[in-house]
Amino acid sequence: MNQLRVLLVTFLLAAIGVAAMPATQFRSSGGILDTHIRITNGLGPDVDLSIHCKSADDDLGEHLIHYETVYGFDFRIKIFGGTQFFCSFQWPGQFHWFDIFIQDRDNCENCAWLIKADGPRRFNSETRSYDDVYQWNE
């Protein structure tokens, strides 16, 4: 019975430690909670895409993505849910934003997105194509 109490207390302390960790930890080590986001500019030749991604805990800053170039970031999801990243997307004459990752919606460790003028498209691993089309969050 004593061993069971020690095991239970150890588990609870470990769970509290994980819950107290920052929501995202960059430069992930390939663990089970690690998520990788890749965003490709698919707007067309000579159209640069400016993006700015954030979560409740992290601001990833602004980045310029040239046509067919990829910007990516890695993070560790919250063990009890709620991880979310949103990005603004700007190119000449256009400004949009989109929730690039919502833990309850996106069931992917490697989430690849293609940004088109009519909205973001997520890579579908079953069809091997960017056919999961979403609308901008306007």
Image (cartoon, rainbow, N blue to C red):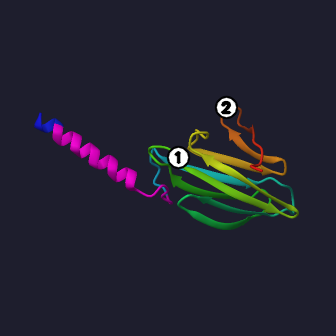
- Tell me which residue sits at (44%, 48%) in the image: 31
Mark linked to residue 126: 2
Q: State the SS at label 2.
A: loop
Label 2 sits on what residue type? Glu
Residue 104, picture quadrant = top right
- Quarter of the image with the N terminus is top left
Sequence-first disc among 2 and 1: 1
Is residue 26 shown in magenta?
yes
State which mark lies toward you, 2 or 1. 1
Relative to 66, residue 123 above or below: above
Q: Which residues are magenta?
A: 5-27
Residue 61, picture quadrant = bottom right
Q: Position of residue 37 (x, y in %)?
A: 62, 51
Is residue 85 shown in magenta?
no
Q: Say which of 87 and 31 sits in front.
A: 87
Q: Position of residue 117 (x, y in %)?
A: 84, 51
Q: Say which of 17 and 112 sits in front.
A: 17
Residue 84 placement, left or right of 91: left
Q: Position of residue 9 (x, y in %)?
A: 22, 44
Mark linked to residue 46: none
Residue 90 placement, left or right of 63: right
Asked if marks 2 and 1 touch (Cβ < 8 Å), the reply is: no
Q: Label 2 vs label 1: CA separation?
A: 26 Å
Give the residue pinned by disc 1.
Answer: 82
Label 1 sits on what residue type? Gly
Q: Tag 1: Cα neighbours inside 10 Å, few (<14), some, or many (≥20)?
A: few
- Tell me which residue sits at (45%, 54%) in the image: 29
Q: Main secondary structure of the magenta part?
A: helix
Q: Position of residue 15 (x, y in %)?
A: 33, 46
- Number of marks: 2
